[in-house]
Amino acid sequence: MFKLLIRHGTTLLISLFGLTLLTFVLSQRGDSALHIYQSQHFMGQYLEYLQYLLAGDWGYSSIHNRPVLYDFLQHFPATIELVMLALLFAIIFGLTLGIMAANRRGKWLDNTLMGVTLAGYSMPIYWWGMLLVLLFSLTLGWTPVAGRIDYIYDVPPVTRFMLIDSLLSQDQYGFDAFFNALLHLILPAITLSTIPMAIIARMTRSSLLGVLKAEYIRTARSKGLSQQRIIWVHALRNALIPILTISGVQVSIIMSGVIITEYIFAWPGVGKWLLEAVSRRDFASIQAGILALSLLVIAFNLALDLLASYMNPRLRRPS
Amino acid sequence: MSLLQIENLNVDFMTDDGLVRAVDKVKLNIESGQVIGVIGESGSGKSVMALAIAGLLSPAARMQADLFNLDGHDLTRMSLAERQNHITSNISIIFQEPTSSLNPALTIGYQLDETIRFHEGGTPKQRKERALELLSQVGIMDAKRRYKEYPHQLSGGLNQRVMIAIALACQPKLLIADEPTTALDVTVQSQILDLLLKVKEEHDMALMLITHDFSILAETTSKVHVMYCGQIVESGRTYNLLSQPYHPYTKALLDSVPHFGMRYKKGRRLFNLPGTTPPISHLPVGCYLGPRCPYAAKKCVQSPELFNIKGRRVRCHFPLIEEEDS
């Protein structure tokens, strides 16, 4: 496990270096200097920039007239909430659909599912999001059109995660606020999870079908185990390893999708904030937003990689 | 009493070239406690036959038999689930590649334990004791440590021992060993064979040994079936068959093996049968050996049946009896 951490840590350091170098260059593009540097050299200034970042000084937005970190922390929880739910949807439904398809390989269910996922995979999400709004919000009236929660609920921001905060305000509104927040969350999350879900479903199917051909599956069958047990214990255990790695890539797809999705649903998150910053040439905010979103992608990838290695005993305990 | 009786077992595969017959009219009879051998080249259908008997054919294969009796039950009259159940509780199988036959993501202990749970049951503690007992029965020294390890941490020979332990946990009446030693080196090979014979005695099982090594057959089996292109071409008692083959193919196989005390002479080469084994999708008309057979005659364009001759079964119009006797 320790060796594994070191191996992943090295790649982590390299990506962090590239990332901070990029945002450092961006931070110097603004009209007014983001930080005051003592060094004259590029590399010296870069090191000072890193020190500022670590100290929590992410620059000052001249447009909002307050520290970038303040705005960022205002918007970040909303994005995390959306991304987590979308990722959860993508993994749960992606896995389920993939397993169903693999189980009925070549039958109509398999063909239908693969057709649907191909469509989902090729869907432009800004269009798909609007279609969902048209159907569920405007025609059927099931879900609200935009925002995180209706204005009649005055939920005090404790954690800034709306689902948690609305639960905390239970004595005021009961579960009403929570369900209202959930209804607001559901369409953006579906929009955002569509492409990753389709990719995970297709990946699950092909990975599972590949594993089901393995010799150890034949052994499991010869033991007389049930089909359920063979799929869920013997096959999925091995099929999951590449799926987890692929899910890490999905996080970056979700992160780039979150910007447009937040815009469509007027979701007050980092994506929407970042879009506004771009249109106002607010380089301080852009640099901080990019840094934060990328850090999130890196963190998710690291976590999923570690999980995948943990699931694969050949990597966990080298012989 | 005969444990396994099979008549006219056919296995077909649907391929791009149409329906292809991998196992053709196989007739087998295994007594309990008997050790029989099946020998043939790669692609002769031995493994497919083994999988068919063990009920492990892939869905692409179609299998049919006139008679399939296992331990007094007629399998042809059972539903698929019943048949599967009856087969897995009576037949175990081990394969050529022990390491890839074990699940890489699960510990040895887990894979053994689930087998015991399915076939014997018991509390977790009883099962673990049973598992350790089985592991030491198959000659694994530090069973407690190995119980927690993964297949990739064990050598091929050890993994094959684990496979045998798993097979034993099913308490089978017949153990099929499909080239169990091909992937192992020679010393381990003899250990595994000894082990198979030992557990066969202890558990009172029949053993079906599939191989392409005559010396293994000579050492272990009492009866041998020779397969070519999905058919059994000759069967008989091991000693008789090896010392005096009736079928030209058996003779050719035996002649192509170098044996101890052979003198080296310049320009002298081992016997080889001209041509190659035809792919089963393009078999010749009549006797499948016909075009390659040194004894072939006009009659060989007709398919020969399996004849009973002197306690042996031979699929040939011109068995090599007269010449040997005279």
Image (cartoon, coloured by chain):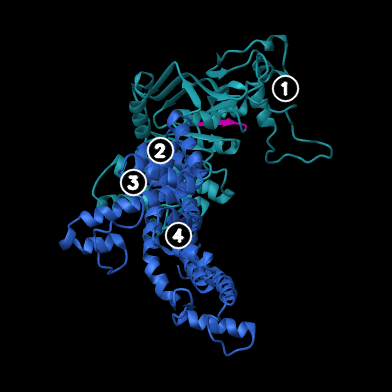
Side of B71 relative to B312 (left or right) = left
> Which chain does the numbered disc 1 sit on?
B
Is A270 above or below relative to A28?
above
**Residue behind mark 4:** A304
**Residue behind mark 2:** A100
Is A220 above or below relative to B253?
below
Is A201 above or below relative to B80?
below
Q: Residues within 10 Å of mark 3 (few under 14, many from 20)?
A: some
Amino acid at pointer 4: Leu
Q: Quadrant location of the C terminus of chain B?
A: top right
**Residue behind mark 3:** B114
Residue B292 marker: 1
Please state which of residues A30 and B166 is positioned toward the viewer in this rendering: A30
Amino acid at pointer 3: Glu
Residue B229 marker: none
> Which chain does the numbered disc 4 sit on?
A
Q: Is residue B27 visible?
A: yes
